[in-house]
Image (cartoon, rainbow, N blue to C red):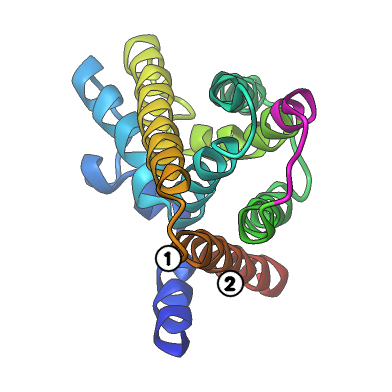
């Protein structure tokens, strides 16, 4: 766990723009392909984003009709990105983003049931914070790569969340004694990632 925390801290300490522009060599996407690639990559190479999306998919597997929560998350991220691109400021967005990772990790860990309507609303709201962060790396780009970027991060979020959802549903269906500890352990790991980002947000 100590090694995991050190690694997570090191990754989280890297500037977000460096992660987001990883595929573009530090510059804004200029073509449709570059925008799409950057959009596909941002939620994956951003450790806090990836952990949140995976945990959201995992937790939705515990809820009846939970798959419908995934579109709510994606819509939330698109709204957040639109707010950033329109010039709206969200004070404390990084702090709230880290808290969202801790919260979803805790929900997975304790496996507490939540009504789909409430969960979908929560995912949409927290998705706004993640989408706001996504837009930082595309701010100022031309329309074509911008739209491709939005499509890219929407598609990759759908794939990650749906994959996590199906894996957890399969895990639950096994009814094996080890399934619950695995699920709870994953939630704890996600919560730890969120805690690292929260500490960095407070310190910065």
Q: Quadrant of residue 119?
A: top right
Residue at figure coordinates x 44%, y 72% from the top left: 8
Instruction: State the image coordinates of residue 164 (x, y, percent, origin top left).
Output: 41, 41
Q: Which of 144 and 168 is in front in this view?
A: 168
Tell me if 22 is positioned left or right of 203 in this view.
left
Q: What element carries label 1?
A: loop
Query: Toward the viewer: 69 or 143?
Result: 69
Looking at the rendered structure, the secondary structure element under dot 2 is helix
12 relative to 10, above or below: above
Specify whether 126 is left or right of 16: right
Q: Which of marks 1 and 2 is in front?
A: 2
> Which numbered disc flags the more N-terminal residue, 1 or 2?
1
The quadrant the C terminus occupies is: bottom right
Q: Where is residue 182 in the image (x, y as percent from the top left)?
A: 46, 64
Mark 2 crowd level (few <14, some 14–19, many ≥20, 10 Å Cα): many
The residue that appears at 68% across and 27% down in the rendered structure is 124
Question: Residue 14: which numbered mark, if any?
Answer: 1
Q: Name the residue under label 2.
A: 196
Is 149 located above or below residue 164 in the figure? above
Front-lying residue, 35 or 106? 106
Residue 37 spot, x, y in % from top left: 24, 30
Task: Pick the residue in front: 127 or 63.
Answer: 63
The boundaries of the magenta stretch are 112-121
Question: What is the CA distance from the residue labelled 1 to the residue labelled 2?
Answer: 13 Å
Residue 93, above or below 123: below
Q: Which mark is residue 155?
A: none
Pointers 1 and 2 in contact (C-beta within 8 Å):
no
Verify whether residue 116 appears in magenta.
yes
Residue 117 percent across, percent down from the top left: 77, 23
Number of numbered discs: 2
**Residue visible at 59% across and 27% down?**
66
């Amino acid at each position: 766990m100590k090694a995991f925390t050190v690694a997570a801290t090191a990754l989280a300490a890297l500037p977000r723009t460096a992660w987001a522009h990883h595929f573009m060599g530090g510059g804004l996407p200029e073509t449709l392909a570059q925008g799409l690639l950057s959009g596909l990559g941002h939620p994956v190479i951003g450790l806090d984003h990836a952990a949140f999306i995976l945990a959201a998919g995992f937790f939705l597997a515990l809820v009846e009709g939970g798959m419908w929560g995934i579109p709510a998350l994606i819509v939330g991220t698109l709204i957040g990105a639109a707010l950033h691109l329109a010039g709206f400021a969200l004070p404390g967005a990084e702090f709230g983003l880290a808290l969202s990772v801790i919260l979803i990790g805790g929900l997975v860990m304790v496996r507490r049931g939540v009504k789909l309507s409430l969960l979908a609303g929560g995912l949409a709201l927290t998705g706004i914070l993640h989408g706001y962060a996504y837009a930082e790396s595309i701010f100022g780009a031309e329309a074509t790569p911008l739209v491709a970027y939005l499509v890219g991060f929407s598609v990759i979020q759908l794939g990650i969340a749906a994959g996590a959802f199906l894996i957890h549903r399969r895990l639950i269906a096994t009814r094996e004694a080890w399934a619950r500890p695995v699920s709870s352990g994953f939630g704890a790991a996600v919560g730890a990632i969120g805690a690292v980002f929260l500490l960095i947000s407070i310190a910065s």
